[in-house]
Image: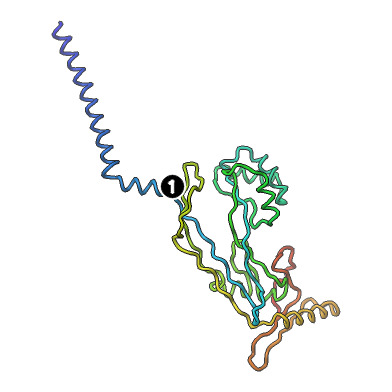
Amino acid sequence: MNRSVHRETDRRALTIVTLLAFFALVIGGRLVQLQWIDRLAFSDRANRQRTFIESIAARPGDIVDRNGRLMATTISVRSLYANPAHIADAAQFARDVAPLLNLDADRLAARLKLNRKKQFLWIKRRLTEQQEIDVRALKMPAERWGFRREFLRRYPQGQLAAHILGLRGIDGDGRGGVEQTFESVLRGTDGERVLVRDARGRVIDVETEPVRPAQHGRTVVLSLDAVIQLYTERALDRVMQEWRPSSACAIVIDPTTCDVLAMASRPAFDPNNPVDVLPAAWKNTA
């Protein structure tokens, strides 16, 4: 009986030692795989998780008249975004931010809750300087929100030659007129740069040299003369006021070169503020 007990004990000990040796071999093999065989693959994967590519927006080119007077240009402004995944109290966040940006707090809170799993959500794009100052003064935790630089199209002459110029949408796409016709010239090509982030997704480093520099848009020179355009539009305004037509247009051409020096249409619109525009105002009757 004692010999039988010893044999059973030896068999169990052998089984345990065999299992321990097997697990040691498995762990050792895995370490060899991680440290030698797949080392480069895992290193590349870790780098991809730490870094990401950010687009560098290209600045749209200017539009000028035949004498170099600025008709359309682009300025740099800030846009506000939020990280809904890091906002525990969406209602409180909305109550703090919405009044500063002329937004509805309830609607903003609903958007944040609807996108609560996302890490990026636009709050308001192209803020005024004062709005940016007011938001920064809240001193909210950095992981909840941030600013991104965007370009804003401005038309220094107001509604002058609006139908000829057209305008650019919220995402910088040309709509109508020269803005759309010469989109490939004005828009430019966006660049790219590499950003390094920590385990929480916060940017901790920016590569000095961009992967691909942005190629800004080129300037488009029109045959229009802004002064002649101004007098032409004033004449049309007098016609509209005196005769009350549904629409009117005028074209001024240099007879020796056939250059179009002015082209105006009424009703018109202000491309700096393209809201509440009458449907007829979009049409270039000329």
Residue farthest front in this picture: 208
- Residue 96 falls in which quadrant of the image? top right
Q: Quadrant of the N terminus?
A: top left
Residue farthest left in this picture: 3
Looking at the image, which is closer to me, 230 or 241?
Answer: 230
Q: Is residue 59 above or below residue 26?
A: below
**Residue 49, image x, y percentages:** 42, 47
**Residue 273, image x, y percentages:** 71, 64
- Left/right placement of residue 28 relative to residue 169 reads left
Residue shown at 77% from the left, 77% from the top: 247
Residue farthest bottom in this picture: 256
| Residue 178 seen in this snapshot | yes
Residue shown at 47% from the left, 47% from the top: 197
Give the residue pinned by disc 1: 50
Question: Which amino acid lies under the numbered mark 1 shown in the image of this protein?
Answer: Arg
**Residue 163, image x, y percentages:** 68, 75
Q: Residues within 10 Å of mark 1 (few under 14, many from 20)?
A: some
Applied colour scheme: rainbow
Q: Is residue 166 above or below residue 261?
A: above
Q: Quadrant of the C terminus?
A: bottom right
- Residue 187 falls in which quadrant of the image? bottom right
Q: Secondary structure at mark 1?
A: helix
**Residue 232, image x, y percentages:** 75, 82
- Left/right placement of residue 90 relative to residue 53 reads right
| Residue 280 seen in this snapshot | no
Residue farthest right in this picture: 242
